[in-house]
Image (cartoon, grey):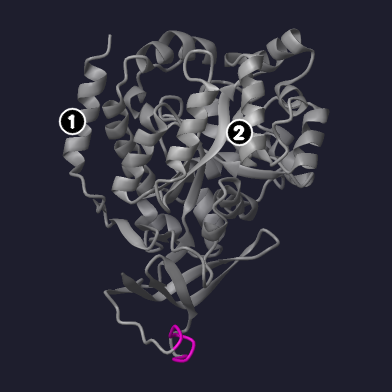
């Protein structure tokens, strides 16, 4: 489709982690942005000799177009455990509540639970997610069927799976079309044998892939790793040769000086999950230090069983404010840096370099923010409004790959929302 947005405010991304907002038009042809400007320059507002014919012409009414948020760590299908296993420690939550019920899931269950999560992503202006869960081809089918963009990684651990299955899923998912990709990874050091971790490293070498895992989420995790191996999870995985092609870690709360050195040297991404870390009392990630040392920080919600929402506005607010409290410094992490993490850095972390900003030639993964809501007024600083005052109520539209999947509280993903809700409740209802 060819879609014209006019009378819009357009968030443009600068290289120095800042933004500027222009007024005018943004044109989408197929899945690409082909024009940003005032709409009066006819020669610039064509593609070659072709004058575009609009399938839709949308008056943005002064609202803001932004690059969609990138949810750089999540377990989407865990929607079935939302508000089910709360107010407990990470180990109890995982081993006594989560793992036993996850073992009862079927591939079809995960398909429907993924769709529920995708719907929630869309309401939050999220246009892609970096997912770790069972049955990756089935997860990806849910995304493809909805028209949503998903990057996957493996949750390989000693409770299930093998390096051979990881490789099979890598090849299957990477062949499922433009909305699908797979990056090599595994669950965590504390759930995965050294033999399997070595296999992951060999596979990353074979495919020249980055590697991602849960890393230093809790102090106990790091302490026990040091008891086993004499080093932290970051140091252990680096010694196994996992990061020749980059990668990173999810959470990255309890880091040592040498861990920071490795992240900086190897160009790794620290994916922070502030809401989940608060809820499980895991700690507060050292965001200011990452940023001051030039380490890239992306943002993830984690799964809806430990969050319990998939709300990027909440994550952005907490990323900044928790950093300020941790450092006892109100200047520690700015709204601009947070929004840059939520969009550009998240995209690059996931290998989505064509989805990182709103520029001609980039893929049209876009959210429209309703600035007419009371929480967006007055417009003293729109970026700060987004991070410190924004909420899901402000998401008016979410477009993925040039297609509008959510607009004015309605979903356009090919599924009836009530059927999805019923299926999710049926799945958890049969669990023991």
Disc 1 versus disc 2: nearer the observer: 2
Q: Which badge, 1 or 2, is on the more N-terminal residue?
A: 2
Q: Residue at x 20, y 29 (%)?
A: 423
Q: Which residue is mark 2?
A: 212
Which is more toward the observer, 145 or 291? 145
Residue 42 in view of the camera: yes
Question: Is 342 part of what is drawn in magenta?
Answer: no
Relative vertical location of residue 35 with respect to residue 95 in this rendering, above or below: below
**Image quadrant assignment for residue 372:** bottom left
Q: Quadrant of the N terminus?
A: bottom left
Around disc 2, counting alpha carbons within 10 Å, would you say few (fewer than 14), some (14 to 19), or many (20 or more)? Answer: many
In the picture of the structure, the residue carrying the numbered disc 1 is 422
Q: Identify which residue, 117 or 162, lies in the foreground.
A: 162
Viewer-nearest residue: 322 or 130:
130
**Where in the figure is residue 103, as x and y percent of width and height?**
37, 14
Q: 10 Å neighbourhood of mark 1: few (<14), some, or many (≥20)?
A: few
Q: CA distance from mark 1 to mark 2?
A: 34 Å
Q: Which mark is residue 388?
A: none
**Compared to 172, does 234 lie above or below?**
above
Instruction: Where is residue 325? Give x, y as percent.
Output: 67, 35
Q: Is residue 7 above or below residue 131?
A: below
Q: At 44% from the left edge and 68% from the top edge, which residue is drawn?
A: 32
At 67% from the left and 58% from the top, the residue drawn is 17
Q: Which residues are magenta?
A: 41-48
**In this rendering, would 171 be left or right of 405?**
right
| In the image: residue 107, left or right of residue 221 | left
Look at the numbered discs 1 and 2 and tell me whether their residues touch, using CB distance below 8 Å.
no
Left/right placement of residue 424 relative to residue 71 reads: left
Q: Residue 370: x percent and y percent?
A: 38, 61
Tag count: 2
Instruction: Please report the residue visible at 35 percent of the width from the left and 29 percent of the height from the top.
Output: 79
> In which quadrant of the rendered image does the C terminus lie?
top left
């Amino acid at each position: 489709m060819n879609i014209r947005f006019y009378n819009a405010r357009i968030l443009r991304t600068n290289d120095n982690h800042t933004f500027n907002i222009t007024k005018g038009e943004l044109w989408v042809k197929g899945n690409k942005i082909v024009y940003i400007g005032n709409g009066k320059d006819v020669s610039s507002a064509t593609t070659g000799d072709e004058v575009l014919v609009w399938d839709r012409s949308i008056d943005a009414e002064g609202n803001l177009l932004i690059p969609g948020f990138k949810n750089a760590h999540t377990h989407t299908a865990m929607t079935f455990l939302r508000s089910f296993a709360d107010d407990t420690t990470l180990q109890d939550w995982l081993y006594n509540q989560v793992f036993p019920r996850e073992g009862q899931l079927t591939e079809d269950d995960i398909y429907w639970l993924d769709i529920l999560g995708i719907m929630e992503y869309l309401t939050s202006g999220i246009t892609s997610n970096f997912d770790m869960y069972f049955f990756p081809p089935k997860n990806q089918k849910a995304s493809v069927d909805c028209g949503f963009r998903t990057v996957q990684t493996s949750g390989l651990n000693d409770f299930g799976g093998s390096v051979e299955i990881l490789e099979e899923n890598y090849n299957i998912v990477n062949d499922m079309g433009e909305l699908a990709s797979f990056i090599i990874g595994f669950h965590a050091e504390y759930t995965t044998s050294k033999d399997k971790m070595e296999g992951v490293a060999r596979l990353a070498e074979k495919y020249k892939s980055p590697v991602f895992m849960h890393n230093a989420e809790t102090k106990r995790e790091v302490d026990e790793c040091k008891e086993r191996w004499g080093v932290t999870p970051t140091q252990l995985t680096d010694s196994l040769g996992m990061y020749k092609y980059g990668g990173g870690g999810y959470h990255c709360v309890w880091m040592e000086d040498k861990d920071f050195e490795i992240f900086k040297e190897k160009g790794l991404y620290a994916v922070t999950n502030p809401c989940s870390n608060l809820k499980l009392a895991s700690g507060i990630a050292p965001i200011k230090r990452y940023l001051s040392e030039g380490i890239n920080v992306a943002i993830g919600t984690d799964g809806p069983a430990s969050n319990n929402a998939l709300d990027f506005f909440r994550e952005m607010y907490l990323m900044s404010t928790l950093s300020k409290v941790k450092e006892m410094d109100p200047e520690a992490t700015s709204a601009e840096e947070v929004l840059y993490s939520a969009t550009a850095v998240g995209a690059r972390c996931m290998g989505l370099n064509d989805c990182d900003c709103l520029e001609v030639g980039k893929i049209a993964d876009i959210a429209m923010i309703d600035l007419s809501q009371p929480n967006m007024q007055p417009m003293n600083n729109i970026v700060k409004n987004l991070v410190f005052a924004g909420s899901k109520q402000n998401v008016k539209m979410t477009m993925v790959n040039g297609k509008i999947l959510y607009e004015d509280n309605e979903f356009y993903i090919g599924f009836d929302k009530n059927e999805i809700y019923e299926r999710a409740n049926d799945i958890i209802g049969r669990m023991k």
